[in-house]
Image (cartoon, coloured by chain):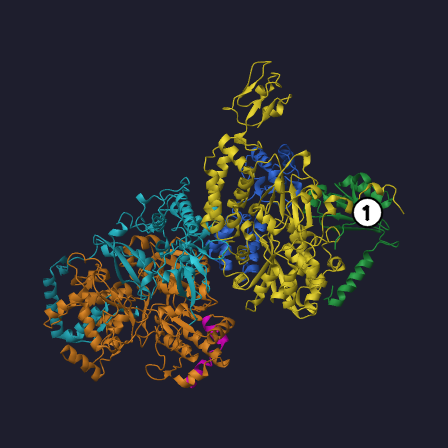
Amino acid sequence: MEEKIRITIDGREVTANPEQTILEAARENGIFIPTLCQYADTTNVGACRVCVVEVEKARTLVASCCMPVSAGMVVRTDTKAVRDAQRMIVELLWASGDHNCLVCEKNGNCELQDLVYWLGIEKPRFPIESPGYEIEKTNSMIVRDLNKCVLCGRCVRACNEIQVNEVLDFSLRGSRAKVGPAFDSDYIASECYFCGECVDACPVGAITFAQARFGGRPWELEKVRTTCTYCGVGCQLDLNINKGKIVKVTGNRDYGPPNQGSLCIKGRFAMDFVQHPDRLQRPLIRKNGELTEATWEEAYDLIARNLSAIKEEHGPDSIAGFASARCTNEENYLFQKFMRAVIGTNNVDHCARL
Amino acid sequence: MEEPMIGSIPTMQEIPFFAHQKLRVLRNRGIIDPGKIEEYIARDGYLGLAKALTEMTPAEIIKEVTASGLRGRGGAGFPTGLKWQFCSQSKGDVKYVLCNADEGDPGAFMDRSVLEADPHAVLEGMVIAARAIGAHYGYIYCRAEYPLAIHQLNIAIAQARECGLLGKDILGTGFDFDLEIYQGAGAFVCGEETALMTSIEGKRGMPRPRPPFPAVAGLWGKPSVLNNVETFASVAQIVLKGAAWYASVGTEKSKGTKVFALTGDVNNVGLVEVPMGTTLRTIVYEIGGGIPGGKKFKAAQLGGPSGGCIPAEHLDASVDYEKVAELGAIMGSGGLIVMNEDKCIVDIARFFIDFCQDESCGKCTPCREGTKRMLQILTGITEGKGREGDIELLQEMAVIIKNSSLCGLGQTAPNPILSTIRYFRDEYEAHIREGRCPAGVCTALKRYTVDAEKCTGCGVCAKVCPTKAAKGEKKQPHEIDQATCIKCGVCMEKCKFEAIFVN
Amino acid sequence: MAKLTKEDLKKIKDKVLAKSALKEEGPRARVTVHMGTCGIASGAKEVMSALMAEIADAGIRDVAVTTSGCMGMCSREPLVTVECLGREPIKYERMDAAKMKRVFQEHVLKGEIQTPFALARGEESSE
Amino acid sequence: MKADNAEILKEFTPEAIEILDKVIDKFKGKPGGLIPALEEVQVALGCLPVSVQKRIAAGLHIPVSRVYGVVTFYSFFTMMPRGKHTVRACMGTACYVKGGKAVVEAIEKEFHVKEGQTTADRLFTFETVRCIGACGLAPAVIVNEDVHGGVKPSEVKGILSKYN
Amino acid sequence: MTNSIEEIEHTDLILAIGTNTTENHPVIGAKVKKAVRSHGAKLIVIDPRDIALTGYADIWLRQRPGTDVAVLNGLMQIIISEDLYDRDYVAARTEGFAELKKTVARYTPEYVEKISGVKAEDLGRAARMYATAGKAAILYCMGMTQHVSGTDNVKSIANLAMLCGKVGIEGGGVNPLRGQNNVQGACDMGALPDVFTAYQKVAVAEQREKFSRAWGVPLPAKPGLTVVEMMHGATEGTIRGMYIMGENPMLSDPDLSHVESALRKLDFLVVQDIFLTETAKLAHVVLPSACFAEKEGTFTNTERRVQRVRKAVSAPGEARADWEIITGLANRFGYPMQYAGPAQIMEEINSLTPSYGGITCSRIEKEGIQWPCPSPDHPGTKFLHGDKFTRGLGLFHAIDYREPAELPDDEYPLLLTTGRVLYHYHTGTMTRLAKGTSERCPESLVEINPQDADRIGIESGKMVVVSSRRGRVTAKAAVTSRSPEGVVFMNFHFREAAVNLLTNPALDPIAKIPEYKVCAVRVEAA
């Protein structure tokens, strides 16, 4: 382990690792520096400049997200020059698009909104000019409203550096710059895999969940952490619940392994089945060749009667059970216990091989 | 034998344009055929390299260059020797020498001229730099708009390779270095060093934050030295003739000579090389031969879109890094545009900020959005829509954009605005408060009026006016209705009595 | 050209200087057309073509023609330098095909300097 | 393979595709090869439409989004077919102060094009450039390789009429 | 997996064989790609299809389906003959090397090229790259196991990894990627015919008695039947009753016509599921169960990590969690099962299962634990076989290449291989009800090489009939060079084009896995 170095932030002497950035050192010591484009586990690009701080002897303000600490560095995060710059930058971003919180899905969970509030900006000094892009609603999973895009590039980095799907990139340049798939096509016409990493990464309302629209405000949603039901990776995810329904699925990067917050299209967008009307709601019993609804008691009775009879007549090994790779450990345990201890056979298997 | 008429022809030294110049970087201009390496060699070419490779250690080369006081001629003026030293200290077996020939400043063509006329001088400087830092490969990043320069470079590189001055075992010393030309694809921001490297890597030429500095992690993450054409073209002579020779001209902190592209409202448009510290007046009036048509000098723009204007009151200022910066401009790569009294300073500021916002890569907020808004405000002012407070807002924005942008483009983009406000605030105020463009440039603010004393009432203006704004009784002085006038200027053009004027 | 060593550089220098020096047995004269971008843009190529045509027509073999880069004086382009044995070089300014023809016929062939187009005589000084 | 070429064959001849593939082969695996490859392809084919970009991306193993990002970043690249002649008006500072704007306006008016557009008859593609380094000739207009210096707005028509 | 998912990102080389990782395990696929793009890892892909990973690969070996043993033996032959193997490791930690060496010696690059179509030169490059890499992880999946030679394939992979000393180290290992969310857990929990939890054998008296004591009843000693054998039993009449919990053999098993007739022959069939699946439709009793979001419990992922499942919403109607249904049923049979909830069931598992001994519900509240974790203070195990193998020394298996059970011939000239696509999951019961995934991938596609397509006269978007000796399906053609010449690929998510009507039920003799990855078919325009 490398030796710690000492630096001063806002008059406080703190220690830091030499490979840390000013931002990391500040955060570790509970000193708040606002950020927008910074996104953990991706390159620090220093694009938004919201995180600027004053460093003694530096020619200009420096972006704390990509400036490494050095011994004896003296940093101020709260000077007038810093605040003026942050205010100007946020005003410029605000005025550059259609940041209308009334109809924005991100209201209450928007990093730009938080910045405006934190800086106490009443209104921008520049006329508000939305670029006027058409809102992309051509698929049922992700809505893109580039009029709300602040060009922080988090979606691009999420796509290229976290999921490495390499579908998103910047195009054009200067104030015409845009993010999106090649040829400025919409997601559905592109090679997008709909992992939804960009939705989780977007700090504003530019990329949002289509099916969650009007499904609940951020403060109404309850997040329940669970394990994905699809493949064997076992991704940790948050089911976002409102009024007993799953509204959307979000990743959570605090959960760590195995997926560090990343999901795929199935974990993210294929949970509709839970609330599907075709779900079985009551036991069914075959009567006169037709499956008809029954009570649990009737179903249990029928099963116990029939299986007991078969066991009686043909022995326990004439009964077989399929456990399930879809069910929990506890359920599989009970199932094999049931087959072995109750029925008395080792004829228990599941689709591990299929 | 004395030529009968030759006396009437001045010698080169008698012509002020040439007399005040001191040729070092341009010493071979007009003399050698750039396509013939032997002509370069005949002018002591590659002797500096030979000396560097056979008589000097890398540390000695760096020491010599440092002692010469040579500073980067690309704009910022960072000491070249120091840059090389940082890179030489970086660990790594792969390092790069990069030549910035992406001369993007509008109104600058120093590098093009050097590459076209004396490409070997650049190659020689690069090999010396490579030896100093321990690099074995290099790139010349040249803008595609310079086909002739690229052509000459290609010839020069091929010849140098053939002669063993590039490639393996240069001059039989065992040192290897080769390079290739990388053609820029049209993005001004690629003149910024990290953007240039990103571009060579085949990506969008967007600048990266520093640190890490290129000397530590540059092209493909390897230690790299980037200098511009003029800097490299100075190196061989420093090595050959020594630091003291180089430092013998110039000012205390700005040594040697500087090449300027002298353009605009000046009689002798061209490429000039003068000792650091020459006054602006000498450059404009002696070398440049003054302003055509007896017009007044208004300002000189130094340093292109990153630079600033220097007004007439500072004509006697010494042109060196420190003084120029003090006056609110930058030395830049050497574009020097002279403007006469007919130029509107707000329009010029608008031109430069338009350039910067058009060339902004779009990565960082202050540059992307800030330059756009500054352009919007300036355009408003030139269109008569300026408001009280605009100047102050521009100044505040300028300071913040300079202070908080990611790269040199954004950090200098507001310079023209700051310097023009500094020297010509009254002209801004005239636009905003009086709706008047003192130079008569801003179309929307033009007022065509009839001088009743000169007007004979011939009626030509009324006849040619496309909107019937010019009208009047026959034989009576005419008038121009400002509400319907579209400021096309036809009336003034056609008036035989010069009775219509514009303010 | 073979790979050079340091010693070769000096030899080349001497050789080139010897070869390019004007002398009785030829070349007696050298005409340099300055062909930077600005020169070409102002018509240096036409000047060069005119010169080559003149030389061909005249059947002259002892006049060297060469090109060089920009002289720095863009506003006077195209520029042409004429050097004749034993005389100071003359720079001609704002050349075109007709002027080139005249300069060739009168100056190069007959030694009569065409003062109306002449910009300067001699060489620039450099260190 | 026919099936793989279906898209690009709509726009280009097999000969053009062969040139394209040669360029791709040349830069395959070369670090930083994308931009020079695009430059060469554009010179050969005139423009870089979607089908060409896709093929370059596949050939160089570069995400097509990155290729598109690069194509749209650099002003040299164009996705649209160009006119027979390229007319570039210099808008460098020297040309600007010497009246370049009026020249641009004259071209736009005379040929009914805006900057970056191609005339209806596909004869001219009109662009403005930021300094070609021929400031001594300001204002300059470049048609293909020919530089025209000291251009007055009234001369525009005459200069361009020589190209057809 | 012997190793952990996070190690993949930071290893030096990844060898992916028989795994279309980005589509089947997208998040692991992302780690592979990240390792390559961000951390400079090398990637070798061995796959007949041009899967997405080939675009990131340094070397791609495109073998003919079913020739994996030959390719792997070829790699080992080169590594041994060029003396690139880990001598110390082989000497200290393995046995059977001499046999292996003798067997693989026949697999010269030229011979392997003849069998597999992999160029000798590429094979050599791959062998050297793998052997000389510092840390190297092998990833594999059903592309290895779903063959009659599945067990041979897996053993060959293990041979290769041991030969180069790449098992038992961080960032190395032999890593099967498990396809289903809790297939690892189901196996760990003893949902297999021959073992109790944690692979304690039913045939071993001592182990059987332990369970017998805990459960309070005598237990059968004879190992039971596997899934495919159960189906055969049903056909033959030896199996009369069947209880299926959360599986859909009517779409997932090979040779579906056979499955259907088997299930129809049963005297009594109970199916417990969340939907009325193809299988449930044949049942006598259907029990509605809660899905993962409606219950508590744990899943064990492919890297042996036991993680919590939490209830987020209520189950519809009267549907119950599967554990509740089983306890209810057991009680009805007169066998008392009383648990307050899954946590209590886990306590019982902890007590009977050494490798799960320390994995209690409370410990995995925040982060899952990887077994083995024998005690409450054990941190869990990131990678296996660090000091020694389960059996002590690692055993090399000398294995020869065998042909797949069914190969193309004049009548059925193409080779069909099957798999998943990113957008759907298994039999599609869930993903096909989701708007997003159905929108992205609405129908089954038959991927066929352009050359084959030209020959047969079909084009993309046109319907084709694919038939084998066992059945026929109709689906849309997608002409693409993703498929090598002579090979067609279909997914098994769509009941409308149930690919398992075509597949061959031939089994791997040991693992009893059907050969889903190779069968002979004919493709014609519909």
Q: Position of residue E32 (x, y in %)?
A: 41, 66
Task: Identify the magenta region.
Answer: E97-116
Which element carries disc 1, helix, strand or loop? helix
Place residue E463 in its image quadrant: bottom left
Task: Give the residue at x 37% y 55%.
Answer: A201
In the drawing, does residue A117 fall left or right of residue E61?
left
Q: Residue E81: horizontal and vertical position, in percent?
A: 50, 81
Drawn colour of chain C?
green
Asked if the magenta segment contains residue B184, the reply would be no
Q: Is E101 covered by the magenta stretch?
A: yes
Residue pointed to by mark 1: C56
Q: Is residue C9 above or below residue B409?
A: below
Q: Front-most of B18 and E454? A: B18
- The colour with which the image depicts chain A is cyan
Dominant SS of magenta comes to helix
Q: Among the chains, which one is blue?
A: D
Q: Is residue E526 visible?
A: no
Q: Residues within 10 Å of mark 1 (few under 14, many from 20)?
A: few
Residue at 61% in and 59% down:
B80
Shade representing chain B: yellow
Q: Position of residue B194 (x, y in %)?
A: 53, 57
Q: Chain E hue?
A: orange
